[in-house]
Image (tube, rainbow, N blue to C red):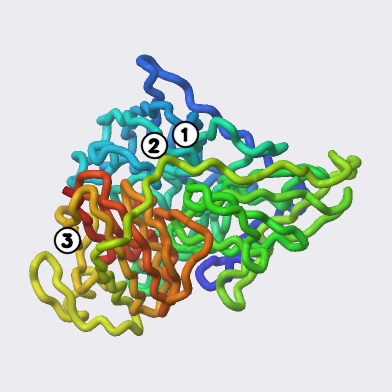
């Protein structure tokens, strides 16, 4: 029987959820429905309430696109044009934000800033070109903590012309749900503790919307795993026991292929990693993938279960894994102004006051309005008029120094642009990483370079969706 989830750790509840169905044991099915092409080359994504069997034997009331949770995997080729009609059949306003894509501002899906919210019963056409290949995702930008928390999220894959040869190319969408003992989504959203601490951490971790025991693979095969963290708040650190995953892209952008440090792939909310995994063990082997990000809360994420078939090849595939770079222009750091962003607030933080709707407020008064966080002493919500943090000159490069003054982790996400990581806590990053979401952990300082080459007002916010809701949200204007 399921137990009250309130106080249990994910490991326990996962076992409980799985415990009733030990016969499950089946391999994960990874077939995602392909969206249907509607007239005019637009494909439809209808957001609506439906139910999903996240936990075997239970129908969870979720929200999804085209009646699936997670939403359909959208696949395009690099250079193609995306054309999607969002139809809103939810009981509240919505939009779609295309996370990580460099697109025209009017297509970015931010209510009140780039478009009017799409009311229930209405629809909106999104159309834009896809300059970059890589692993991206889509989700609403209205009441995101609730809408994403109920399941509105899907993968968006833009394929390279010449991808590295692999035997299977798979999406692994990681999500984290807070469920009741009847496997229903726990309400309410936006609780005081979640807003003021680490966000809405759940008790049930899913892979592509399911709770599989094991993932089947064959000795000798090479996999490309596209890991996407769509959780509201949970950071994952997947450790592939006895394997050496190679990271070839971060946030969809190719990087120098490198072994995951200590075999762990760390992903904050919103982040992605493309990983090459060589199935190097013998037929019949079985090892565990563990998520051990949070101290003393590690749990078994999934088992890698090798079939008994003879190895697919006698020696590991000897093909290059590096991806061709996307057409990004490197920032020019000569004369680039340095801008500081202080990430402030939360419980046990040092924030004393911040401005909210143009009014200076003490922490107590802020808390009364559900605000606990600030960027450079500005706190605002997801509604109208998130404060403008910086005004950048179109075509100019900047250095941004992100200083985490709180005792929580913040995956800081920028829209319409990609950051180039320069250094973390003063040590220069050698890997030429481009990221749209940077996990700035407690006490850390990151320095990044940014070429402001896409005009418009762009959101810059924490992707712990409760932090965004409670003040860690701002606008960077490029003009
Ligand atoms: Cu994935 Cu502004 O968000
Ligand atoms: Cu945060």
Question: Residue at position x 19%, y 58% from top?
Answer: 386
Crowd tier of the residue under label 3, counting other residues whose Cα lies within 10 Å: few below 14, some 14–19, many 20 or above: many
Q: Is residue 10 left or right of residue 438?
A: right
Q: Residue at x 59, y 66 (%)?
A: 10
In which quadrant of the rendered image does the N terminus lie?
Answer: bottom right
How many callouts does the rendering have?
3
Asked whether disc 2 touches disc 1, contact meaning CB atoms under 8 Å apart, the reply is yes
Residue 183 x, y percent position in the rendering: 54, 54
User: Compared with residue 388, is residue 318 higher up or lower down, i.e. above or below?
Assistant: above
Q: Evaluate if marks 2 and 3 touch, with contact meaning CB atoms under 8 Å apart.
A: no
Alpha-carbon span between mark 3 and mark 1: 36 Å
On residue 48, the disc is 2
User: What x and y, as percent, mark residue 53?
Assistant: 58, 44
Q: Secondary structure at mark 3?
A: loop
Residue at the spot of label 3: 387
Residue at the spot of label 1: 67
Say which of marks 3 and 1 sits in front.
3
- In front: 141, or 417? 417
Query: Looking at the image, can residue 223 be seen?
Result: yes
Residue 23 image offset from top left, x and y in percent:
78, 49
Identify the secondary structure beneath mark 2. Answer: strand
- Frontmost residue, 277 versus 155: 277
State the residue lying farthest toward the top.
39
């Amino acid at each position: 029987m399921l137990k009250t989830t309130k106080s249990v750790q994910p490991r326990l509840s996962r076992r409980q959820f799985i415990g009733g169905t030990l016969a499950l044991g089946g391999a994960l099915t990874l077939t995602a429905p392909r969206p249907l092409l509607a007239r005019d080359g637009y494909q439809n994504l209808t957001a609506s309430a439906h139910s999903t069997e996240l936990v075997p034997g239970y129908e969870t009331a979720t929200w999804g696109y085209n009646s699936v949770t997670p939403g359909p995997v959208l696949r395009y080729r690099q250079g193609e044009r995306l054309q999607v009609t969002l139809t809103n059949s939810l009981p509240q306003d919505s939009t779609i934000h295309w996370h990580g894509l460099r697109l025209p501002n009017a297509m970015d899906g931010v209510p009140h800033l780039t478009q009017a919210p799409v009311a229930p019963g209405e629809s909106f056409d999104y159309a834009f070109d896809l300059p970059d290949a890589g692993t991206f995702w889509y989700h609403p930008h209205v009441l995101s903590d609730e809408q994403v928390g109920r399941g509105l999220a899907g993968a968006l894959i833009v394929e390279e012309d010449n991808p590295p040869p692999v035997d299977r190319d798979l999406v692994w969408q990681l999500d984290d749900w807070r469920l009741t003992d009847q496997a229903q989504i726990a309400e309410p959203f936006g609780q005081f503790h979640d807003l003021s601490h680490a966000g809405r951490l759940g008790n049930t971790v899913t892979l592509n919307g399911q709770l599989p025991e094991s993932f089947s693979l064959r000795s000798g095969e090479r996999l490309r795993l596209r890991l996407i963290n769509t959780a509201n708040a949970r950071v994952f650190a997947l450790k592939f026991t006895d394997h050496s995953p190679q990271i070839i892209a971060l946030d969809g952008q190719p990087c120098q292929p490198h072994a995951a440090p200590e075999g762990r792939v760390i992903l904050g909310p919103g982040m992605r990693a493309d990983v090459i995994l060589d199935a190097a063990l013998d037929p019949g082997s079985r090892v565990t993938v563990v998520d051990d990000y949070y101290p003393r809360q590690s749990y078994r994420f999934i088992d890698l279960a090798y079939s008994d078939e003879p190895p697919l090849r006698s020696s590991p595939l000897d093909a290059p894994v590096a991806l061709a770079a996307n057409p990004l222009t490197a920032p020019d750091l000569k004369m680039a102004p340095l801008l500081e962003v202080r990430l402030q607030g939360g419980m046990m933080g040092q924030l004393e006051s911040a401005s909210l709707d143009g009014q200076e407020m003490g922490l107590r008064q802020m808390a009364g309005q559900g605000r606990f966080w600030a960027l450079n002493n500005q706190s605002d919500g997801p509604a109208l008029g998130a404060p403008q943090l910086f005004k950048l000159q179109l075509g100019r490069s900047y250095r941004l120094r992100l200083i985490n003054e709180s005792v929580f982790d913040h995956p800081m996400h920028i829209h319409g642009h990609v950051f180039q990581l320069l250094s973390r806590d003063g040590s220069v990053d050698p890997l030429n990483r481009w990221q749209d979401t940077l996990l700035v952990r407690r006490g850390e300082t990151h320095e990044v370079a940014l070429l402001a080459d896409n005009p418009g007002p762009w959101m810059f916010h924490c992707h712990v969706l409760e932090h965004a809701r409670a003040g860690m949200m701002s606008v960077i204007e490029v003009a």
